[in-house]
Amino acid sequence: MVDIDKKLEQVSRQFCIEGTYVGHRTIQVGNVNQTYEVQFILPSGEEKSFLVQNVNTYAFRNPVQLMENIDQVTEHIRRKKPGQVALHFHHTADRKIYVIDGDNFWRMTNFIPASVTYSSMIDKQVVRNAGKAFGEFQVQLSDFDSSKLSETIPGFHNTKLRYQQLEEAIQADPVGRCKQVQPEIDFLLSVKESACKLTDMQEKGLLPLRVTHNDTKINNVLFNPDDNSAIVVVDLDTVMPGLVGHDFGDAIRFAANVVPEDCKEYERAAVNLDVFRAFAEGFLEMTANTLTDNEVDTLGLSCFTLTVELATRFLADYLLGDPYFKINYPEHNLVRTRCQIALAKDMQEHQKEMERIIKECVMGEKKHG
Ligand code: GN1
Ligand code: MG
């Protein structure tokens, strides 16, 4: 068993942090990387925290390229909005923004004090501001040359590929869990065609590729607790070329679900249309005037798509013995799968209403210019 304090202090020193190491706090948010807040008393006497992350190299096979992406994206945003709070990565003595230590890949960023994240039971104003923040993020990157970005996870939101990976996991069934999950497999296969429609349209060139965030859980936005304004969008590991619906749909499947994404009473999962509207208002306030008709027409479908796609990912991971997502108990990925499936079913029932709300928001924005 490694002494985590010893390890975190040693990593911090490699990022040139001086002074006295005080301790750490494990951050529970995030299903892929492991995040810690480390506290120091600097030589000046100032108490200061930093965020140290151990990047999951099973998920991100080329973390060096990933850091190059993030570096370019954060620089681009910083140039657009100098003075705004931004993510900033610390350098080692040899000017690298990461430390490789055996199988571990570490990075360190500034800790943004007096900021909060929200995961559930969210106020509408918070959701609207999250929508604005993710919308603005995409607009800020609209002139970023996407050929400079590497694909950190190939085919990340290629729903067809996600189905293929699920089908391979079913075939292989290495830990013998397949027999337990036939209803889930049956449901997912039954909606394959509609879930893969976005990918089909992308392949046919009917939807434009943009630079998108691709992991728009509301807890990837830091807020100011005094007025609930968004401070900064974080977790830039999956910033890559993608569809606007990837960001919109993923945000809705997380924020507008009436229960957390891993609720054990998964049959309660459903979309809260007020939260849906609040996010759509914020997101479209920033993006409506840049979207094509096909993009607007498929935003409603994108919510269903991203929900089903994540269900295929959770289920494939469960079938493979949970190598990818962090789990807190053995059935965790199965519960997550069931919760996404229940949400997807509810979204199917509310698809028309969701589309109507989107149209209303877009019309409103076009009128106001
Ligand atoms: C992961 O890293 P985190 O927890 O923000 C995952 C997302 C999933 C999400 C589900 C790189 O996001 O794609 O939607 O879990 N990120 C990656 O909670 O796979
Ligand atoms: Mg992430």
Image: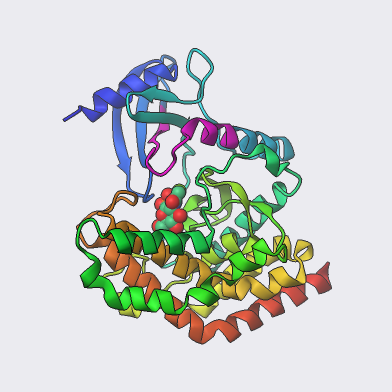
Residue at 38% over, 49% down: 30
Nearest the eye: 150 or 249: 150
Start-end of magenta stretch: 48-70
Q: Is residue 138 visible?
A: yes
The quadrant of the rendering that contains the C terminus is bottom right
Q: Is residue 343 left or right of residue 360?
A: left
Vertical side of 69 occupied by 319: above or below? below
Q: Is residue 276 magenta?
A: no
Residue at 59% over, 39% down: 150
Residue at 31% over, 64% down: 170
Nearest the eye: 228 or 142: 142
Q: Is residue 61 magenta?
A: yes
Residue at far front of view = 171
Please, which colouring scheme is shown?
A: rainbow
Vertical side of 190 occupied by 126: above or below? above
On the image, the x and y values in percent for residue 107 come to 44, 30
On the image, the x and y values in percent for residue 183 come to 30, 78
On the image, the x and y values in percent for residue 363 come to 76, 76
Q: Is residue 292 left or right of residue 29?
A: right
Q: Is residue 99 left or right of residue 281?
A: left
Vertical side of 268 occupied by 154: above or below? above
Q: How many marks?
A: 0
The quadrant of the rendering that contains the N terminus is top left
Q: Quadrant of residue 120?
A: bottom left
On the image, the x and y values in percent for residue 208 come to 72, 59
Nearest the eye: 208 or 213: 208
Q: Is residue 275 visible?
A: no
Vertical side of 41 occupied by 334: above or below? below
Nearest the eye: 182 or 294: 182
Residue at 32% over, 79% down: 267
